[in-house]
């Protein structure tokens, strides 16, 4: 992975049309400005993980899967 | 009472005021804003989140404490504001909010998304899938078979 040191207000260019500005450096977080073409998706990595996970979860949410799932939950099905 | 046709549960009738409102939808399903939280006695402790806009869209969830009794809910201030909660302190599970983990099935067993629980403001019924900032929780936390799991835990008492 390429590592670069930048100060607040400095910019990084990626390719011809993506620009990243280090807008503010706080104690524990940095605020980053991103200029990119409209068709380029820009999301936090954890949001991408959650998107993919939601798609997978929606695909398996079928009634016939629930007996198997219940075996994994404490107490199992209440009878 | 309105009736709604679902893939999993056939035709269901519901009180409109019991619907949950997700002002931002859910990641990957941003246009789905209205859901019902359904519980079935023989399927406890599962909570089914059924979309009211897409009859085929349903998530199987479970109160987060069923998966991790000591779960620490942390939410970004924007998420707290979105569902009408004060931003000063993390909300109290069971009392102020219902906190649900979305379940998935993988080849090596089911997993729970503890990174991004669904948080419902119990008073306003506004809800958000809260991607925890700086969280060490996994989006694919493996569930263990019940026999091997911790014994003696109470089933959750905060279902909708």
Image: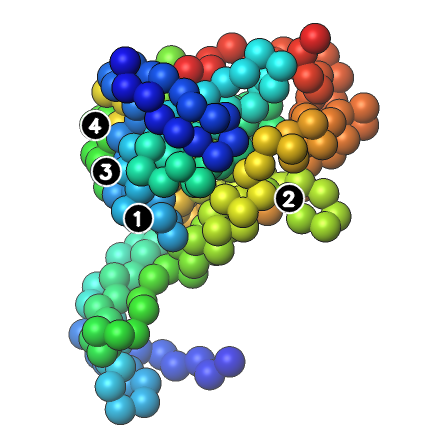
Q: Tell me the number on the disc at residue B157.
A: none
Mark 3 and mark 2 on one chain: yes
Distance between the alpha carbons at the discs numbered 4 and 2: 32 Å
Distance between the alpha carbons at the discs numbered 1 and 3: 9 Å
Quick one: which residue is furthest to the right in this view?
B147
Q: Nearer the viewer, residue B41 or B79?
A: B41
Question: Which residue is label 4 attached to?
Answer: B84
Q: Tell me the number on the disc at residue B105.
A: 2
Q: Earlier in the sequence, mark 1 or mark 2?
A: 1
Mark 4, secondary structure of its residue: loop
Quick one: which residue is furthest to the bottom in this view?
A16
Which quadrant of the figure contains the C terminus of chain A?
top right
- Numbered disc in front, either 3 or 4: 3
Q: Residues within 10 Å of mark 3 (few under 14, many from 20)?
A: some
Quadrant for residue B17, please give it: top left
Mark 1, secondary structure of its residue: loop
* Residue A26 image point, x, y percent: 27, 57
Residue at the (36%, 79%) spot, across then down? A5
Mark 4 and mark 2 on one chain: yes
Q: Earlier in the sequence, mark 4 or mark 2?
A: 4
Distance between the alpha carbons at the discs numbered 3 and 4: 11 Å
The answer to whether marks 1 and 3 mark residues whose Cβ atoms lie closer than 8 Å is no
* Residue B13 image point, x, y percent: 36, 17
Quadrant for residue B37, please give it: top left
């Amino acid at each position: 992975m390429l590592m670069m040191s930048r100060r607040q207000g400095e910019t990084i260019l990626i390719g011809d049309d993506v620009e990243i500005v280090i807008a503010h450096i706080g104690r524990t977080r940095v605020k980053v400005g991103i200029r990119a073409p409209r068709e380029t998706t820009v999301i936090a990595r954890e949001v991408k993980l959650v998107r993919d996970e939601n798609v997978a979860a929606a695909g398996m949410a079928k009634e016939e899967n629930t007996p198997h799932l219940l075996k994994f939950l404490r107490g199992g099905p209440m009878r | 009472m309105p009736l709604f046709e679902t893939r999993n549960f056939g035709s269901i009738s519901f009180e409109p005021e019991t619907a949950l409102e997700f002002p931002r939808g859910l990641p990957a399903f941003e246009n789905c804003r209205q859901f019902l939280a359904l519980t079935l006695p023989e399927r406890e402790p599962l909570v089914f989140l059924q979309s009211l806009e897409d009859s085929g869209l349903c998530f199987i969830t479970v109160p987060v404490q069923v998966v991790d009794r000591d779960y620490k809910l942390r939410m970004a201030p924007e998420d707290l504001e979105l569902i009408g909660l004060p931003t000063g302190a993390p909300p109290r599970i069971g009392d102020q909010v219902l906190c649900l983990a979305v379940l998935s099935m993988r080849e090596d067993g089911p997993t729970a998304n503890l990174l991004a629980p669904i948080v419902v403001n119990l008073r306003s019924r506004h809800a958000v899938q809260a991607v925890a900032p700086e969280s060490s929780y996994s989006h694919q936390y493996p569930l263990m078979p019940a026999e091997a799991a911790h014994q003696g835990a109470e089933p959750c008492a905060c279902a909708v």
